[in-house]
Image: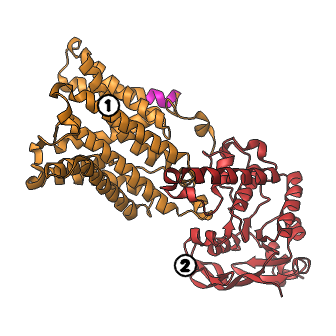
Chain colours: A orange, B red
Amino acid sequence: MQDYLVSIILTAGIYAIFALGLNLQWGYAGLLNFGHVAFMAIGAYATVLLSMNGVPLILAVLAGMIMAGACGAFLGVATLRLREDYLAIVTIGFSEIVRFILLNWSSLTRGSFGLYGYPRPMEELVAHGDYNLILAGIVIVVLLLVYALIEILAKSPWGRVLKSVRDDEAVSVSLGKNAFSYKVQSLALGSAIAALAGSLLAFYLQYINPNNFQPIETFYAWIMVILGGSGSNRGTIAGSLLLWGFFSTTRFLEGYISLSPSATGALRMVIIGLILIVLMMFRPQGLFGRKEELAVGK
Amino acid sequence: MANEILRIEGVRKVFGGLKAVNNCSLSVTEGTIVGLIGPNGAGKSTLFDLISGFARPDAGSIVFSGKEIVGLPAYRIARLGLIRTFQIPRALMRMTVLENMMLGSQNQLGEMIYAPIVRRSKVLADERAIEKKAEDFLKFFDLLRMKDEYAGSMSGGQKKMLEMARALMADPRLLLLDEPFAGVNPALSERLIEKIKLLRKNGLTIMIIEHAIPYVLALSDELYVLNKGAILASGQPDKVISDSRVFEAYLGVGSDAQP
């Protein structure tokens, strides 16, 4: 039972960090990033590959964040001058490009065989069996730090400009704000946060391969953000807990349903889809969103 | 002669085959209110777009306080102290009235991504000062009681007022008002006229597009009439308005149609 709880905390915590990066981009800046998983993959692979080559772990994690942030900024610069949907198209393409590069650059990534046996933080301190407990602690601390960072930024003048860009870019420009730069900044920061989640995921899984980073992971993050309420960081964390809580509790029910594993997996997603539809009908602002924000007319 | 704050020379903007603004020249003296009138489609709002950098002229020069601003991005022009409002009020709907206001303030340290973390106390102190200033302006426009409401819940007239108040937060040197009285009820409009006059008294230069001629006459020190993208008449408001060409432009009566 304890292992089970720890595994929920780990998964939900890591994905909450991942989704907080997306919430910064979508909830505050209104950017449609459909390729968020790419930055998680960059973080995971950069951290693992660098640390396997002797780079200290903390530096390897930072390097992954910087690489992902730079990629996010680059995609933003390339597409954000166009209509907003171009970002969605380009990011989803980018996430598949990243995955296929990881799959095919075998000399570096060992392709679909994946990577394992890489260093993990504080590993030498505990017996192997207890390691997940330590890692859960690390994940919670990182989650709280990321949450605090985004909350402070969102409530600051910087976040105010971001929200003005989301609501009406022309207004922010007319008041002297460089809207384009703020969109690039939020993309870069959100991507760096996704990379941090990627590093933690690699530590947890002990084995990464490119198929950990399918587009569906991006949409898990979207479900968490929408479930919790766009623009609410607390909601995003709650969304992650709910989604992973749902995934793991329904696993217990598998014994009672005479369906193949792939069919139960599909059934789970059907139920999630239904929950989202019902939520949009009766509580479109999400669990923690502000109803007044939606009620205001255009 | 007093200082010239804005000089526009030979400005032209073509959309497809339509000459929206055609060889337009005008000059604005510091500390005055300049009215800009003309029939629908005359190119008034396009001219505002060109001055504020939201559109780029095909030809001509725009000099704001001695600096050529054609080609500068709109946000840089705003930072020089040239702030515009929009014809259709553009409140930031999902932000509160107070947040809308505080956004207008210029040179905020806290808008740099590192500052809210690294220089937290300075940013918080700045915020208190900006909030105080925002409340003063809200009071000036009788909007203070709405400060914590979402701007999206305001009426059209209130949004117009908010937009003007927000523009003032930027401490503009030249304020471009695009139909500030549209959607504002008559009683409020009378008060708004007094407020705009007060702003001029405090040294603000204002260019104003307005269809309601009485309001324009009450406010303007100088009046320009735009028709089909070109300046048709200019000068003292009461003289300009009695010019027969202006009358014709508005009513579409050609001189040959008269008996």
Q: CA distance from mark 2 to mark 1?
A: 54 Å
Q: Is residue B178 above or below residue B96?
A: below
Side (left or right) of B197 relative to A215 = right
**Residue A167 can be seen in this image:** no
B80 or B45: nearer the viewer: B80
Instruction: Give SS at disc 1.
Output: helix
Q: Quadrant of the C terminus of chain B?
A: bottom right
Which residue is under mark 2? B71
Residue type (three-letter) at the residue carrying disc 1: Gly
Side (left or right) of B52 relative to A121 = right
Q: How many residues crowd mark 2 within 10 Å: few (<14), some (14–19), many (20+)?
A: some
Give x and y (percent) for residue B104: 65, 58
Write the residue at 69% across / 79% down. B229
Q: Quadrant of residue B79?
A: bottom right
Front disc: 2 or 1: 1
Instruction: Give SS at disc 2.
Output: loop
Q: Which residues are magenta?
A: A277-282
Looking at the image, which residue sits at the far front?
Answer: A125
Side (left or right) of B232 relative to A284 = right
Residue type (three-letter) at the residue carrying disc 2: Gly
B201 or B108: nearer the viewer: B108
Q: Quadrant of the N terminus of chain B?
A: bottom right
Per the image, is B21 magenta?
A: no
